[in-house]
Image (spheres, grey):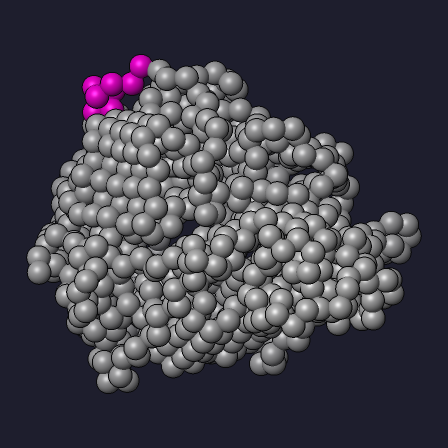
Amino acid sequence: MVEKSVEVLTPEPDESARNARRIDGSAAGTGTAVAERDFAEVLGGLVKAEQISVDSHFFDDLCANSLVMAQFCARVRKRGDLPSVSMKDIYQYPTIRSLVTALAVEAPPPETSSAPEPAETVVPVDRRTYVLCGTAQTLIFLAYCFALGTVTARGFEWVSKGSGLVHLYLRSLVFGSAAMLALCLFPIAAKWILVGRWKPQEFPVWGLAYLRFWTVKVLVNANPMRFYVGNPLYVLYLRALGARIGKGVTILSRTVPVCTDLLTIGSGTVIRKESGFTGYRAHAGRIQTGHVTIGRDAFVGEKTVLDIGTSMGDRAQLGHASVLQSGESIPDGEHWHGSPAERTDVDYVRVPAARCGTLRRALFGLGTVVQLFVLWVPLSVGGAYLLLTEIPALNQVLGPGATHVTSATLYVDALILSAVLFFGSLVLGLVWLFTVPRLLSLTIKPDKVYPLYGLQYSLHRLIARMTNVKFFGWLFGDSSYIVHYLRFLGYDLSKVEQTGSNFGTHVQHESPYLTTVGSGTMVADGLSVMNAEFSGTSFRVSRTVIGPRSFLGNNIAYPSGGRTGENTLLATKVMIPLDGEVRENVGLLGAPCFGIPRTVERDTRFDHLRTGDEFRRNLAAKNRYNLRTMAFWLFVRWVHAFVLTAFALAALDMYGVFGQLMIALYLAITLAFTGCYFTLSERFITRFRSLEPKLCSIYDPYFWWHERLWKVPEHYLNLFSGTPYKTLLWRMLGVHIGKRVFDDGAGLTERTLTTIGDFCTLNQGSRIQCHSQEDGTFKSDHSVLGTGCTLGVNSLVHYGVTMGDHAQLGADAFLMKGEEMPAHARWVGNPAAEARGAAYRPVALNGSPQGHAAPGRG
């Protein structure tokens, strides 16, 4: 940190002013001067300066950074004589004088100010209830596996009695169709039997009411109908679950609503992908359910959250990367965006309508059904049967005779079979990706409007699915080789300035052939390029251009027509503007976004390593290290495939002795093995040691080793969400985690740098990220959650953060690096700041002290 020593232009403080919690703007002289002096005193202690000028710029003159200013905000909050300051205030008013002036103008009179309501204290469940819930969940899973194994075994036995290809096809059609219908209808029936109709209520986690809720949630998400998102059949599925959905609704989000009876969507509405509207949330150790109401012809953007108790009127719009907090509503015809959402004039439906009536939707759905049952189902069942009977090794295992589990031949066969399938799929997959989607894309013209549910719509969605294979992004990401992969895929990457970390492992798009990324731009992770625009009846694809020499942080949805240009810093979770001037040579943060410094002194200290001969040597060394990382993880994943293949052959071999029980055991054993295997893989890399906070260049060998950790597969963790086993896995991975934590689907990037206190509540999609990368600089530090904290849906906690006991972070909030949340505080927004007013509770519980009703008819 560069020390500055400049004159403080403030008079001596007045004692009466010191006792005030706000700046009295009416007392123009004394109150403001005292506040300026006190702010300068706090800031001087952080930047190691005895005197601070009230006109010195925090970043340009004092060389502070966001971490230092977050500490400044935390120290100010602890002072009873100073007003609360947020990071947004710091960026908008980057001198002490402008900050004090703004706070004096914005502060409400004491008699009208509303103090924030403290967050609730978690009432923990006892250990006995916790253990019983986990045991019951295990038994439910095993029972489902046994039922699935029984149906599968009986079905294949019946299929095997057919003679000839025609009989095989017909029997595969009958059995496959019946099994598909059963898989689709069973979750619907289970929901109506176990719950009936959902209603607004709350109940504690781990109890009997929660067990019923969890069972329905898991079954609803396991339904094959979830793969028909974007299809009219998916709307029918939600209606069967109790949702009130009008005609002509298009849902593109793969987040499946759980409390469907509380969901109302008006005719003609469009909901973009990665939007959350589940009808429930986990809050302070309880599950709360509530209504989500969306009017006619409304629009819900990408990466949005509709919390419980929210509503949108007819023709209302909620922009991309936005959130409606519980209790909020958008009036008819208004457009809102941001976190927290606010009114805007931006029109997010920019594609003209087309002819797309009920008949077109019905024919599209009917065509999907015919294609599924006539083609894909019999091919899957019949193909699996032929695979088992025609491959000599498998036929030998299935044939009569002594068991082969103790024979080396079985494991040699598993070795060969897994290698052929794993590495063969890898090669053929790359060939397919680089050819077939490119040919299909020729049928779709950019900027041309097409009706939904036609040929072009089907091909567009097929291209998006085929070119967003997560495995290849995981394999090539965080290395120089991701550039070549994306370019072959269809990206226009201009003249590439190779850094060795141009893109992370999670990059998605809607059309790779209409994606342009400027020279010298780096992308951290979680970028979603939005090449397509939708209305209730039409869509079109357009080129999306990201400017040169820019840096994009994590979890950004970049739409076509985004108003950012050259040399911009797009901070994590920033909302990309669609109006106004093109932003260049500036940083953008928040939702809606506002300007911040493009870079600070701390992030430029390693710039000398990005040019010249030293850069070329470092890049070559990084490339070699990344190649070894890729080879290592390919080997690890192939070994995993080999073990699963050996388990499968052993289960088939012993099927004649134990029957369908072996299929159920196979499903259970593979799940347990997968969790333990990848856990041990990560701990092996870290040598069972904890990470340490770090500040280094991306050309430091430590960073290359840290990138290797990011490639640890974590998709399997979501299978354990909502169960005690998720906490057990986190503990095995090195997380310092307390007792009876409820994790509904959170993600932790640096496990050993994360501390989570007892009885915390982590919602679906929440994430604790103990690192940051900006241009060529990498930073990491501990993040600590106290006892009973709650992370809202899709919220993100950055590195160096401390949350006090029972603090609550709202849905889609972004808690920036270095922030300190006081105990019992409630923060919302992007960036997060203190929430005002009363906390939301489900309508049925307002005025009701108990709130213990079980889900169901009540």
Q: Residue at x 60, y 53 (%)?
A: 25
In the image shown, does 162 or 274 lie closer to the viewer? 274
User: In the image, is 784 to the left or to the right of 190?
Assistant: right
Q: Position of residue 360 (x, y in %)?
A: 25, 20
Q: Nearer the viewer, residue 275 or 111?
A: 111
- Can I make out residue 752 in this image? yes
- Percent across and percent down for residue 308 are 30, 51
364 w.r.t. 107: above or below: above
At x 27%, y 59%, the residue is 841
Q: Give the quarter of the figure containing the C terminus.
A: bottom left
Residue 595 versus residue 652 in the image, above or below: above
Q: Position of residue 454 (x, y in %)?
A: 34, 21
Q: Main secondary structure of the magenta part?
A: helix
Q: Relative to the observer, which residue lies in front, 198 or 256?
A: 198
Indicate whether residue 694 is drawn in magenta.
no
**Taking the image as drawn, is residue 410 in sight?**
no
Rendered image quadrant of residue 645: bottom left
Residue range in magenta is: 355-363
Describe residue 711's horizontal placement relative to residue 219 as left or right.
Answer: right
Placement of 73 over or under 269, stated as above or below: below
